[in-house]
Amino acid sequence: MKVSRPIFLLCAAISVAACTSARYDGPVYLDKDAPIEDRVEDALSRMTTEEKVAVIHAQSKFSSAGVPRLGIPELWCTDGPHGIRPEVLWDEWSQAGWTNDSCTAFPALTCLAATWNRDMSALYGKSIGEEALYRNKDVLLGPGVNILRTPLNGRNFEYMGEDPYLSGQMVVPYVKNVQKNGVAACVKHFALNNEETFRHSIDVDLDDRALYEIYLPAFKAAVQEGGAWAVMGSYNLYHGQHGTYNERLINRILKGEWGFDGAVISDWGATHETDAAVKYGLDLEFGSWTDGLAFGASNAYDNYYLANPYLAKLRSGEFTTKELDDKVRRVLRLIFRTAMNSEKGFGSLNSEAHAAAARQIGDEGIVLLKNDGNLLPVPDDASILVVGENAVKMMTVGGGSSSLKVQHEISPLDGIRNRSKAETKYARGYVGDVGGTFDGVSSGQDLRDGRTEEELIAEAVAMAGEADYVIFVGGLNKSEHQDSEGLDRLSLGLPYDQDAVISALVKANPRTIVALVSGNPVSMPWVSEVPAILQCWYLGSEAGNSIADVLFGDVNPSGKLPFTFPAALEDSPAHYGGRQFPNNGPTFYDEGIFVGYRWFEEKDIKPLFAFGHGLSYTVFEYGEAKADKTSMGEGGRIRISVPVKNAGETAGSETVQLYISDVESSLPRPRKELKDFAKIRLGPGESATVTFEIDEDKLCFYDDSKAAWTAEPGEFRALIGSASDDIRTEVGFTLK
Ligand code: BGC
């Protein structure tokens, strides 16, 4: 589409006249117009060794010292990644009890990934960046792009799914738009942090193809395309070295191959020794457990591995300033880009625009998994029974470091009640986690209910028979062993016997809709009984409004799954054949590159719901894909176009997905791999042509014998469809 714009001519004379202000004659590092590298070198040259050591470790739970003598400010970090964490006490995780630090909670990153919309990621980054800026934060600890290897990982809700290309595409706009605020994105957890239980001691090993093709691309995109200013090292080990200071991952790949010029920040408490931290790439140490008493030091932060212990080694000559200066340069660069960024504004907090952004991202991320007989959308005047704890439970409190203190959170029940024009009743259905506090933040809810399971089900069933529609809102929550940091889930099933509640409800009322709130796949033994299922994620402040938007058809669902829902846990790669889980110590990723849909296709295992799946209230018809040529040479490109028509009566959006299949290859390759996607909006009866451009990069695999990306000449197929298991048209071509 071409857009013509009026041309504005800049008058050279005006700009010359405007530039006659007095010349700055202070030190270079304070000259906002000087190149950043000159400022870094100038500041570095003025710092004492003690001052240098002081800027590379924490001075409080979330801040590091600046250089007070030189007027270089402190650096303040905040979690991340779904909203701005409340202020905590100086050396405690507990909230400080401020009353001006409530934020907007944006949908969890799984939901963002499920939008398959790069513009939503840009909107997310812009909005959360503005909130961070208003709260005077310099570094946002997020986003996270660890690949979903197992559906039991307690932190999958903070990540962007199982596919390296989708995660890479979705992380870049987030990073760029956070940083437009003068706030650094700190992409985490680099790398291979794919399970939680033994996150401090699991020692991951895998072949280089899996490393380069599956686990690293999203980080690489965040760094090279997004221009991330910070990266957080992971807790786990890789090849026997902790991720936070890892010779291969950080020195050779991140800083070497990818040319990362920002700072590597440790995960909180991920540093365990001085020498390796000095040598293998850590720049800024946070969260090591302070041990002031044992050391008898005046400030416990002096005991950090990159504090006095490092200073002593510098003084004794065990280390020269070579590594130190590199770390300080990186930290200074980070400070000049953020805390001393003279172009940044002031941000905004809890604005109407942020609530609208959260709602829009939620609207676009909700996935319609099933809709037999077009049961959804629910008519305005239908009487509704809402059942389930997740219809009322606040989900922004809990789950670990991403826990928030929100200005408001609309529950699903309130969202439905506000929107429905008829009566909406509520039955609890089951009792799950009645707690609601995290690090001193309380949801203020009292969810205790002393009734037995039988009594709760009996009540819900009796009420279900009297309603036109039943909407069950369940799923997981943010308590231990669910979607929560530090521990993994214990099974794929829904907790608290929700399966029994759902089966009883659908027997009592066939117009039962299940809306699942979770950041992970769950098993659904009742899938064939229930006519309509929505995957709703954790949607943040506007949760209930987004859910109501989709339930009532104000928004036509357009989310697509960013990961596979396995039918059974043993079907998924990390659990296949009874593999050990959770893992501790040396752990080899046997499945190699076959992660997510790559695995299910390779093994011919039918998933419950496939990667990329997501229905709509309208129907999209795909025409025949056509290539502009049948072969391409080195450096060439092929354009593949496919017409798509909205053949229904409702406007809606479709994500057209391009997968590439390498017909013959010297190394095993997945049956197909996502290589591009486009989300288009079409009115009823409207058509559009989507054109994808394929270059050699999209045909490559990582050849570990050559340590290089290779595109082998031969036959390829471009598969275009609505989901990984719903390819509508394909076209072949040759790479010469
Ligand atoms: C988490 C990080 C988080 C940090 C600070 C760690 O436990 O792994 O993701 O940013 O704490 O809260």
Image: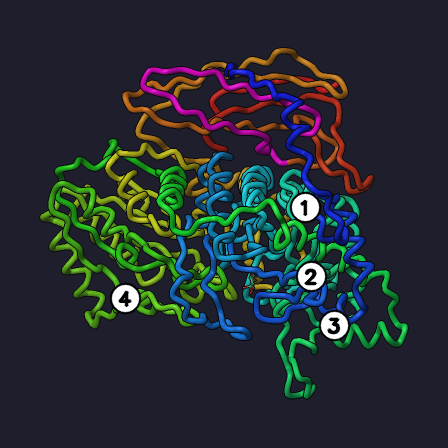
Question: Given this view, does label 1 or label 3 mark the residue nearer the observer?
Answer: 3
Q: Identify residue type, mark 1.
A: Ala
The residue carrying mark 3 is 273
Find numbered disc 2 in the image and state the secondary structure of the residue it sits on. Answer: helix
Relative depth, front residue between 587 and 443:
443
The residue under label 2 is which amino acid type?
Thr
Residue drawn at 73 percent across, 55 percent down? 330
Q: Is residue 70 left or right of residue 432?
A: right
Q: Does residue 298 sit above or below 600 in this rendering?
A: below
Q: Which residue is mark 1?
A: 210
Magenta residues?
670-699
Q: In this picture, is 439 found above or below 183?
A: below
SS of the residue at dot 1? helix
CB of residue at label 3: within 8 Å of ligand 1? no
Residue name at image x 61 percent, y 16 percent: 639
Q: Is residue 230 above or below residue 687?
A: below
Q: Which residue is mark 4?
A: 445
| Magenta stretch: helix, strand or loop mostly | strand
